[in-house]
Image (cartoon, rainbow, N blue to C red):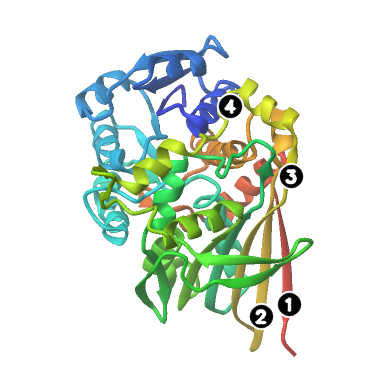
Amino acid sequence: MKKVMVLGVGAQGSIIARRLMEEEKVEEVICADYDQKAAEESAKFSPKGKALQIDARNVNDIVKAAEGCELIVNGLPPDFNMTVMDACLEVKANYQDLASGPVEDMEFIPAVERQLGRSIEFETAGLSALFNTGSAPGMANIITREACELFDTVDTITICVYDGMWSNKFIPFWWSPETAFGDMAAEGVIYENKKFVKVPPFNNPEYMEFKGLGERLMFDHEHEEPVTMGLLGDKYLKGVSNVYFRYGGPGCELARYFWKMGLLSEEAVEVKGQKVVPMDLIAKLTPPAPKYEDEIKAVLEEGMISEEGAFLVRVDGQSEGRETRVDAYFIAPGLQESFELAGVTHETYGTGQCAFLFTKMFVNGKVKAKGVFPPEALDEEERRYYFEEAEKLKLYVEFNVEYQL
């Protein structure tokens, strides 16, 4: 694969672009973004890099810039997914993105179904479109499929992400605060008794025990995994009946208090004769996550209050006639180590490197299926390659199996 475009070189896309430049089989990496500076910053690390300013709302602009590309990695928000997929079909390039939703023009489940519904188009064109490729979703889906292979039948999949980073400098989220607050204020989707169910924000608060960490408060959270796994559970996940994605951490609890106060509402309220949208005010006042190396260094020098986290995939079901539970922990570098390794935050390192590994699979011809599919569709050989390459980047998975006698 000689030529690849990374469209959207923000926190995650820039990691993918930089790592691609290290691949021997890649001769050119087009770093494309609406922000010319961002494109140039990503392209400067290697002679293989080429910076382009692109308006991704215009499919013709993407097609023109991507001429000769064999893969387009979509690092943009999910609202651009359909446009970039259109461009891939016209260019005859494979497709990869990091998320399915939320999108502005439809609800979460139809947005995922819309992507899956384009499978025949890509299959007919002899192309692969792999979507939801980060850490969660992405690595979480690979781990889930691997765990499910240990079962005869699966009852419940629970994916839990706890982010306990808290610094002396007030940073509630290590990605876009606006995105974080918006996600948390949204109705979640769970897959329960083989049906999709909408639940209110911060649904089902529950203390969960994490190995080496103790009990932490977790909530149901809007995410892609219950949707794709519910839609494809009979095909890939041993007929799973229930799928939950749960999130917790200091930022989550802060958002819950804001939500209870109405501060995450998009409806304007009158304050001293002025109309104010509470969410706009919160987004404006919340400090952004540190993005550049000097910003991260300043946070670390100011000091950390806590640096803890957990990423657990739990699968419950039956194996050889016994009730069985598999707890699979994803272990990745924390903030300090991520900065020492790559000059980025733990959030950027984990998501960006996991996403790059899917890109590397394309580059090395390891993605075999044609059509549109999420990571849980990858077969044993593809998953083995992914895990082996992940370990080289200090990304590990620990599987623990319990049988009920």
Residue 341 sits in quarter: top right
Spatial distance from mark 2 to mark 1, Cα to Cα?
6 Å
- Mark 3 vs mark 2, foreground winner is 3
What residue is shown at x 43% (from left), y 14% (from top)?
37
Quarter of the image that includes the C terminus: bottom right
User: Where is residue 285 drawn, in percent x and y?
Assistant: 45, 37
> In front: 138, or 53?
53
Q: Is residue 340 left or right of residue 6?
A: right
- Mark 3 vs mark 4, foreground winner is 3
Spatial distance from mark 3 to mark 4, Cα to Cα?
31 Å
Q: Is residue 217 left or right of residue 305?
A: left
- Type of the residue with mark 4: Arg
- For residue 324, the mark is 2
Is residue 365 visible from the viewing direction of this image?
Answer: no
Q: Earlier in the sequence, mark 1 or mark 4?
A: 4
What residue is shown at x 39% (from left), y 50% (from top)?
182
- For residue 402, the mark is 1
User: Which element carries disc 2, helix, strand or loop?
Assistant: strand
User: Do the CB atoms of the residues marked 3 and 2 lie less than 8 Å apart?
Assistant: no
Residue 391 sits in quarter: top right
Classify mark 1: residues with Cα within 10 Å, few (<14), some (14-19) or many (20+).
Answer: few
> In front: 328, or 365?
328
- Type of the residue with mark 2: Thr
- Type of the residue with mark 1: Glu
Q: Earlier in the sequence, mark 3 or mark 4?
A: 4
Q: Is residue 197 above or below residue 35?
A: below
Q: Earlier in the sequence, mark 3 or mark 2?
A: 3
Q: Earlier in the sequence, mark 2 or mark 1?
A: 2
Residue identifier under label 4: 19
Q: Is residue 302 above or below residue 376?
A: above
Spatial distance from mark 2 to mark 4, Cα to Cα?
39 Å
Residue identifier under label 3: 305
